[in-house]
């Protein structure tokens, strides 16, 4: 990995319109606008972020020339091999304005570091590491995903469009053992026992599944680098560079050369090299919580250093962001996750947010039941913290609305529930989650349905709805981070209000509204004579007698101040 933390530090120190409507307000570019005219919200807050999560290999093939590497040409089980998606494809969609039109302000893609070269067969047919979670070398990118230059371009392009980048990181395990990929030394990993998930000990000091060697992250005992890794670096002509960087890192920090600190060094290199804004951390509960605090400390230092050296590229004053996957954690747990014999507060160990597994089951409830619950819990238990809500994902075999029967309701629930929101690629286009002939989570990981979006009008209508709600959410942090209040039960109308750090934001939203003429109460939020704009129907209205009147066939209204 180029540019060690110490080298960068020393460099810095040493020299361094329809009839009857009015024109839409300029602050909210319509979904047909180009990227150049889109609005970047200067009041972005992670508590209200809209995160788009995609599998790098399954989103967009930007460079077919990199589709086959390391002789990964064995026949595989269905959807268990590489399909060509890559870093360059993601960048193309940023440039196309796809994410901007959807209101996305943070991008999370699966790991792009070099993966094991071989395949495994656990009864589902051969499987390659297309998903990115089977690390072979943390210091290199996998050529199936792209190059360092392409990653740099992706991050820079995202930042120019007001989109933050979350790197998906794995610290607790290597890739599986294959004919091409030997096991790491026993000083580095354990291969048994397999986790039982009934106590803290048998969840952290164990292998997640069979044949997935577990990094001994709790150890402070110094270890030598694996001979196979040294030989690899030597063949690639970067052995001296990597060893020198490690010497500088351990001399600067004073950490013991134990397994976890090697990996922490390698992960944080990506921050001060590329300006990564945050980490989505995999398998959090399988590592002692102090390790995450250590990762956050080094990540924050690297991020602040990058910002000092790249002042023109800095998006905002937000510190480095870490969101964790504590499997089966839900917002109702509050600050602590219960292992049965021990409770752990991951929020006190580096995490700004945890992925919330609870919304996918809450989503069948009435809107008000969901929204009021989340607003109350967030304000009661999560000061300056949040949760990342989702409805579907890459490894949850019980997603909300797996058959995609009501994708517009899914948009309303996901994007309007208090907290941060995670769109899983294809949520917005009703990508099929029930692929015939697949085994396990492969059915959730089909290639992005771009062809359907081009050929099926209903898919375009679904996407248009997600875009309108998503853009409104991006414009208004109060939706994710503000206080929820119901204004009327029938029709269902509510407000969100946020007042933080001299920034005030308020909106009124109506759902399940009748077709035709409709009266929407805004009293107590907006005074008489206030000019409002319905971002959904693109209509200007004026508050009279504590309400506004809209006449259209939409069942949703997104009201904001005209002067916003």
Image: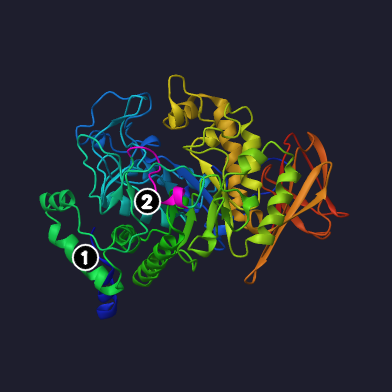
| Magenta span contains residue 145 | no
Q: Which residue bears the numbered disc 1?
A: 245
User: What residue do we see at 25% from left, 80% from top?
Assistant: 14
Residue 432 spot, x, y in % from top left? 51, 27
User: What residue do we see at 75% from left, 45% from top?
Assistant: 368
**In this rendering, is residue 196 above or below 256?**
above
Q: How is the image coloured?
A: rainbow
Q: Is residue 561 visible?
A: no
- Label 2 CA crowd tier, 10 Å (few <14, some 14–19, many 20+): many
How far separated are the C-alphas under marks 2 and 1? 22 Å
Where, by quadrant of the figure, is residue 379 drawn? bottom right
Q: Nearer the viewer, residue 516 or 15?
A: 15
Side (left or right) of 24 relative to 260 = right
Most extreme residue toward the top is 437
**In this rendering, is residue 497 above or below 457?**
below
| Magenta span contains residue 206 | yes
């Amino acid at each position: 990995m180029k540019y060690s933390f110490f080298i960068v530090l020393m460099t810095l120190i040493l020299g361094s319109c329809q009839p009857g409507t009015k024109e839409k307000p300029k602050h909210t570019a319509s979904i047909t606008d180009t990227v150049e005219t889109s609005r970047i919200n200067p009041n972005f807050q992670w508590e209200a972020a809209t995160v788009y999560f995609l599998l790098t290999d399954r989103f967009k093939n930007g460079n077919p020339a990199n589709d086959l590497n390391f002789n990964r040409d064995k026949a595989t089980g269905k959807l268990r091999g590489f399909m060509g998606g890559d870093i360059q494809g993601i960048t193309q969609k940023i440039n196309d304005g796809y994410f901007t039109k959807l209101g996305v302000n943070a991008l999370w893609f699966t790991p792009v570091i070099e993966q094991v070269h071989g395949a495994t067969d656990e009864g589902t047919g051969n499987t390659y590491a297309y998903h990115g979670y089977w690390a072979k070398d943390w210091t290199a990118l996998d050529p199936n995903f792209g190059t360092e230059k392409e990653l740099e371009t992706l991050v820079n392009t995202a930042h120019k469009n007001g989109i933050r980048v979350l790197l998906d990181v794995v610290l607790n395990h290597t890739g599986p053992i294959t004919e091409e990929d030997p096991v790491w030394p026993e000083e580095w990993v354990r291969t048994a026992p397999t986790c039982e998930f009934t106590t803290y000990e048998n969840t952290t000091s164990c292998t997640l599944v069979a044949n997935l060697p577990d990094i001994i992250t709790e150890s402070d005992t110094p270890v030598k680098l694996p001979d196979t890794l040294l030989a690899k670096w030597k063949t690639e002509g970067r052995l001296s560079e990597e060893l020198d960087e490690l010497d500088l890192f351990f001399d600067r920090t004073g950490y013991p050369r134990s397994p976890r600190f090697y990996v922490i060094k390698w992960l944080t290199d990506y921050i001060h090299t590329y300006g990564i804004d945050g980490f989505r951390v995999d398998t959090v509960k399988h590592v002692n919580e102090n390790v995450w605090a250590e990762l956050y400390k080094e990540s924050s230092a690297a991020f602040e250093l990058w910002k000092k050296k790249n002042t023109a590229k800095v998006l905002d004053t937000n510190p480095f962001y870490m969101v964790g996957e504590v499997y089966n954690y839900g917002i109702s747990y509050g600050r602590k996750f219960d292992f049965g014999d021990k409770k752990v507060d991951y929020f006190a160990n580096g995490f700004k947010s945890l992925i919330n597994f609870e919304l996918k089951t809450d989503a069948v409830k009435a809107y008000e039941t969901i929204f009021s619950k989340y607003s109350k819990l967030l304000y009661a238990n999560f000061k300056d913290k949040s949760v990342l809500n989702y409805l579907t994902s890459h490894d949850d075999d019980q997603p909300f609305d797996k058959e995609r029967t009501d994708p517009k309701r899914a948009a309303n629930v996901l994007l309007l529930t208090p907290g941060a929101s995670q769109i899983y690629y294809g949520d917005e286009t009703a990508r099929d989650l029930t692929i015939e002939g697949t085994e396990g989570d492969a059915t959730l990981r089909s290639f992005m349905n771009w062809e359907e979006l081009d050929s099926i009008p209903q898919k375009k209508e679904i996407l248009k709805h997600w875009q309108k709600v998503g853009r409104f959410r991006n414009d208004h942090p109060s939706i994710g981070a503000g206080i929820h209040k119901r204004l009327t039960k029938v029709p269902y109308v509510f407000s969100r209000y946020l007042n933080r750090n001299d920034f005030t934001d308020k909106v009124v939203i109506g759902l399940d509204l009748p077709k035709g003429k409709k009266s929407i109460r805004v009293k107590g939020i907006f005074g008489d004579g206030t000019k409002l704009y319905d971002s959904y129907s693109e209509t200007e209205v004026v508050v009279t007698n504590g309400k506004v009147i809209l006449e259209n066939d939409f069942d949703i209204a997104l009201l904001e101040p005209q002067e916003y």
